[in-house]
Amino acid sequence: MPVTVILGCQWGDEGKGKVVDLLGQRADVVARYQGGANAGHTIVWGNRSFVLHLIPSGIFTADTTCVIGNGVVIDPAALSREIAAVERLGYHVKGRLHISLGAHLILPYHKALEKAREAARAQRAIGTTGRGIGPAYVDKAARTGIRVVDLLCADTLSAKVRANVKEKNALLRHVHSSTELDAEAILSEVIKVRAAFAPLATDTTALLLRALAADRHILAEGAQGALLDVDFGTYPYVTSSHPTVGGACTGLGIPPSAISEVIGIAKAYCTRVGNGPFPTELSGMIGDHLRSHGQEYGATTGRPRRCGWLDLVALRYANAINGVTELAVTKLDVLSGLDLVRVCTGYRIGAERTDQFPTDAQALRDAAPIYTTLAGWNEDIRGIRTYGALPQTARDLVAFIARGTGKPVGMISTGPRRSETIRVRINP
Ligand code: GDP
Ligand code: IMO
Ligand code: MG
């Protein structure tokens, strides 16, 4: 059975956790392929809610196998805390969660360097989550990273940690005038927490290829979103990994030909946390409405999310580079109570009109959105489960999104819970 990739088509926080949890109930394996604890994927079920940062969003379905792929960067302390918190909720993790031996570790010097680099950028700061993501991927590319496999050999681990701390301390001290770190203290912390997950480490690519051969259904879970991709996003205001579809192959070790479906998730509006261009951003009452009704505060850092109208130029671009086969439109309920709803269908950059998404941050900063205005609705649609029960104007918006992107809408989310979902097929 094929692989379904589920990924964000905006700047993250599109509701990936909700959708993966829901679809994961009928999957055999849920596998996270990139990012780290910068992600915050919220799952709401029954009277419970939980924010996952590293563990795949299939963990709350009892029989689902979960995989953290080689493309993920793992903060050992964060992962061991998360495993303990999930177990306290009564869910088995050991035996169900498999962690790639090839995944890289995030250690305290990554966070210290990130903090120093962000401070040095001052006005040009990226507004990162502070979880050490960028510096960990730098080490991976520089071939100095420490991987999960290294946790299994005490000598290798200590030699690598000591060498890295020595190098990072030189940077911290001489480049950033910052405090040096103690390699022995880092080592003893890592050794303390590794017991929580080292036994779960395995060759996850072999596991996934076996699952494919046995015709099992795999959901590949992306973190962040297409517009934060280090190559295809609004560089340099991006994360340091590939949330886009190729990341599922390189971050798990599955062949592209195994992917039969790419579900692109987009909110019915846009949000962004951190800095960088955001053409449809709204300040004022409508932005405040979206933030308060949508509870738009970072699931990882608690920062208020910047809010704005849906941007079809950006969404078409995300769909195109990911080969999205079907859209899931989330948080439609948040638009309730607005007299009108705007959708950006093009940009004006200087004297030019364009429907192409410029990834150059400066060009995007200069892009003025061109809007189509649709009628809004007053009814509270939270929790509606059938398409026909939506107000006509809400259905018009969904049809507009399908037409404007040329993609079918297969799912509409009307609330954070599993049940607050409409399964449909709205063709372009
Ligand atoms: P992710 O990072 O893509 O998994 O998304 P987050 O969990 O960071 O943010 C999405 C937020 O919206 C979470 O608080 C979800 O519980 C919530 N959510 C998801 N879908 C809906 C929806 O359709 N309506 C509303 N009101 N909230 C939703
Ligand atoms: P999920 O998976 C929203 C943003 C940060 C910052 C930029 C770089 O929950 O959708 P990083 O810490 O990755 O180096 O920060 O990326 N960012 C996210 N924004 N949702 C996320 O994850 C994000 N992960 C990182 O705010 O702008
Ligand atoms: Mg999130």
Image (tube, grey):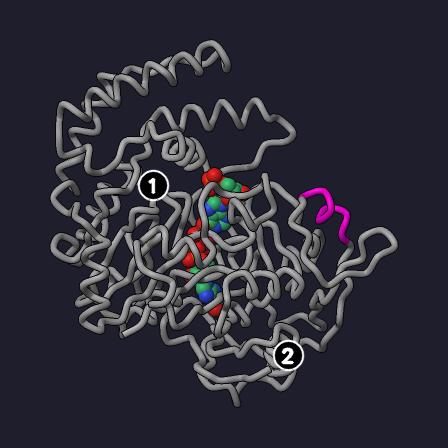
> Does 109 sit above or below residue 405?
above
Q: Nearer the viewer, residue 309 or 328?
A: 328
User: Is residue 352 shown left or right of residue 322?
Assistant: right
Looking at marks 1 and 2 on the same chain, the residue that comes earlier in the sequence is marked by 1
Q: Is residue 302 left or right of residue 360?
A: left
Name the residue: 59% across, 39% down. 236
Q: Position of residue 33 (x, y in %)?
A: 35, 53
Is 37 placed left or right of 405 in the picture?
A: left
Q: Amino acid at mark 2?
A: Arg
Q: Secondary structure at mark 2?
A: helix
Going by the numbered disc 1, the residue's amino acid type is: Val
Q: Position of residue 399 (x, y in %)?
A: 61, 81
SS for dot 1: strand
| Picture quadrant where residue 316 is located | bottom right
Label 1 to label 2, Cα distance in Å? 38 Å
For mark 2, does the 10 Å Cα neighbourhood hold few (<14), some (14 to 19), or many (20 or more) residues?
A: some
Where residue 281 sits: x, y (%)? 68, 53
- Magenta stretch: give its range: 361-367
Q: Quadrant of the N terminus?
A: bottom left
Answer above or below: position of 96 versus 425. Answer: above
Image quadrant for the C terminus? bottom right
State the residue at coordinates (50%, 67%): 323
Q: Is residue 363 magenta?
A: yes
Instruction: Residue 403: give its label.
Output: 2
Can residue 252 be spotted in the picture? yes
Location of residue 201 in the rendering, given as x and y in whole percent from the top left corner? 17, 45
Instruction: Compare residues 332 and 182 and report the one nearer the observer.
Output: 182
Instruction: Give the residue displayed 34% in from the left and 71% down from the top.
Output: 22
Residue 73, disc? 1
- Name above or below for residue 323 compared with residue 118: below
Taking the magenta stretch, the answer to whether it contains residue 319 is no
